[in-house]
Image: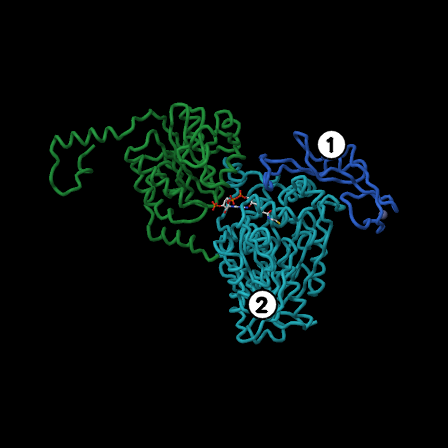
Chain colours: A blue, B cyan, C green
Amino acid sequence: MAGTVDAARCRACARLTYPTHYYCPACGGREFEPVPIEGEGTLLTWTRVHALPLDYEQRYITLGIVELDMGIRATGRLEMGDPAIGRRERA
Amino acid sequence: MRDVAIVGVGSTQFGRAQWSLLKMMCEASHDAIVDAAIGERKIDAVYVANMGSVRTSRQAGLASALVDRLNLFPAAAEVVENGPASGASAVKHGVQAVASGMCDLVLVCGGERMNEVNAFDATETVSYLSHRYAEYVYGVTLPALAGMFARLYMDRHGVEPRHLAMVAIKNHANGARNRKAHLRIPVTMEGILTGPDAFMNNPPVAEPLRFFDCCPVSDGSSAVLLAPAALAAEFRPKPVLVAGIGQATDCQAVHERPDPTQLPAVRLAAEKAFAMAGIGPADIDVAELHDAFTILEIAESEEAGFFAPGEGAKALERGDTALGGRLPINPSGGLKARGHPVGNTGVSQVVELALQLRGEAGDYQVAGNPERGFALNFGGFGNNVVATVLKGGV
Amino acid sequence: MTRTLFDWDAGEPLTPEEERMIDELEAKLRPPALPMAPYPPKAITLASGEVMVVRQASTDEVDTMLRIIEPVMWLKRDFFDIVAARLFGELLAWKLHRVRNEYCLVGVVDGELAGIVNGRLVDEKHGMSYHTLTLKRGLRVGAHLFASKMEHHIEFLGQDEVWIVAESPIGHRRWMIEYPLEEKFDVQHELGGAPSWVLTRETYFKAKERLVSGTRPVPEELLARSWPIREPDLRVMLVQVEDLLESRI
Ligand SMILES: CC(C)(COP(=O)(O)OP(=O)(O)OC[C@H]1O[C@@H](n2cnc3c(N)ncnc32)[C@H](O)[C@@H]1OP(=O)(O)O)[C@@H](O)C(=O)NCCC(=O)NCCS
Ligand SMILES: [Zn+2]
């Protein structure tokens, strides 16, 4: 996953969300501060996709959902060679 | 609210169209109008279901264009877009218009011509449904979301690849009986899973999902004509009633859902539709579920309340959901074999159920005079779901 | 070679002198051929459960194939017309000895022609892939046959490279990504048009497990059923082709 992606922390209730919403899903707040997505996480699920949109020259890409220790989940490209549910992964 | 009846249905062949999107839609609409025998009566409003025409067919304002081709002036007209659930959403709007008393005769027409662009472009168009910044930019497509869902679901519920193959085999067998289906080729377990050449016949698309776990990219159009139940008898002897409609939404980014193996929008939409109809899942005789990916038929059959969680695959294995089973699911072939012209699918499900309840489904007619049908139309990856309950024999 | 083929203007027997001249002329027109190893037949179980035998076709079968291909030339869809028209010419040229080192493989399901692939040897090490025509749709017959053709070039004919262009751009992009093919733009493909792409021995063997299927040897009884190719009922076939053309949407 790209290192520059931010999650949002609600200034009112501190709830972390990714992706961002206009209202905080927990308290309805509208003020957020960016929090870089980083650290380690556990792989929740993954797939190797062969049905790709335009502009992809690869045969497939590997995507997964990671449950990050920082308390959010994120969807993104996996770099590991043999993914498995429960495996540790860096953001 | 007035009760609303389906007085006419129509549908084109599904597959790869030679003709323009509008021409297909005219055909389906014409069939529905003829089926209803409305005579000189005027159609008050037209709702068109479509998702991608701006990109795939370079046509915006489809509903106005359809009114023009069919000479339905000055009918009200608009397009309803709710991704792959556009069809059921448009039916819902039509039903609301009639139920409220604002309109008497309403035409709902779904149409999509995805094959006007190439397969990569079609995949791209559909992937716009995903979250632009948290999913799409990483290469997430609808098959990718389905693949991730399938892996987790199979892991938690002991669903095996052979169960997915059974959905495909069942729906291909049903589709082979449906003259209008896109794919009319029966497939076998040996051919797609266990045989020596199965890997090549059925290559991975979004692992663990394979080719035969996915719906095809289809063109097609379907239409229904709605009228107040009180007037319906004027048009046809056995109108079908729209007994209940329910809709629910969920997070756009799939990873934000509390439990990514659950489809709460399916559960809520089904509950609402059943509540409105005053019946429950056990009363349903035939269902058309949104099997864009085989895993979804199993998961939805549980979320909609037909089977307990984790029991869907067992019911399938027992043959309960086969054409001759206790609750036939997707007798038309479903999205898997009938095809999935994205925005049209919800309308076509309603057309299929109406035919079943009228006893006019021909070679894929469910036996025993089914009286209650259930359709589930699944938008996005389950972030906007519409369920419809129909009652026949009125 | 019997003379009757050329003896079209009624009755007059050819003089020995004339016969000799035609022989010589004919001999000049016929290209010399490289010896080519035969393609050992294989059996593929399709998704439908039907078994397709992939085997080499002989020139005796060309007329039957031409009759089957002919109506497809009018199918203006998915480049069927151009593939069928060119294949028609190529197979005829093969039968009449007007092309060097051509071969043709067919997929046959119980006597029914499911698809045709052909190509030729440019020299011992380089192959030229011509066409892939699928008549039985929806069962990835085209992909199976294309893979068989690559198998023939690399494994049985012992070549190092196969040069490829596709008539359909999207089909081409697929092969390119699937195998994947590499650019070989300095080679002009015989089908004209686009520059060539190449499948090398190395990429073939990397892709083989994924893309090449089938079982050998084919049981005698099954092989026997792959021959002869059934002469289709032309009327039925034309109706089917027209159905496709006129399909309601
Ligand atoms: C599965 C998928 C990737 C296959 O696409 P493809 O490889 O481009 O397939 P093609 O269009 O080349 O079709 C190849 C053949 O298989 C058949 N076919 C296509 N899709 C098929 C499918 N899903 N199942 C069975 N057969 C299929 C076609 O009829 C075609 O037959 P023919 O050309 O021999 O007549 C594609 O259908 C797909 O992306 N499906 C998902 C669509 C989607 O996401 N919809 C939105 C969901 S909400
Ligand atoms: Zn908050």
Work out whether residue A31 can be spotted: yes
Q: In which quarter of the image is residue B79?
A: bottom right
Q: In front: B309, or B107?
A: B107
Residue with the mark numbered 1 = A89
Dot 2 crowding, Cα within 10 Å, few <14, some 14–19, many 20+: many
Residue B367 x %, y %: 54, 61
Residue B314, percent from left and from top:
63, 47
- Seen in the picture, residue C127 relative to A46 is either above or below; the reply is above
The percent coordinates of residue B290 (x first, y second) are 62, 53
Note whether ligand 1 is within 8 Å of mark 1: no
User: Disc 2 marks which amino acid?
Assistant: Leu
Q: In which quarter of the image is ligand 1?
A: top right
Label 1: state its secondary structure.
strand
Kind of residue at badge 1? Glu
Quadrant of the frame with the N terminus of chain B: bottom right
Q: Are marks 2 and 1 on the same chain?
A: no
For the image, the number of numbered tags is: 2
Q: Is mark 2 on a helix, strand or loop?
A: strand
Q: Say left or right for B365 vs C93.
A: right
Nearer to me, C99 or B285? C99
As drawn, the label of residue C187 is none
For mark 1, name the chain: A
Where B289 falls versus C131 (above or below)?
below
Q: Can residue B394 be seen in this view?
A: no
Q: Mark 2 points at which residue?
A: B225
Q: In this view, does C38 lie to the left or right of C210?
A: left
Residue at figure coordinates x 76%, y 46% from the top left: B258
| Front residue (pair B102, B193) | B102
Q: Which residue is drawn at 68% across and 36% down?
A: A77
- Residue C152 lies in quadrant: top left
* Cβ atoms at labels 2 and 1 below 8 Å apart: no
Crowd around label 1: few <14 · some 14–19 · many ≥20 (10 Å): some
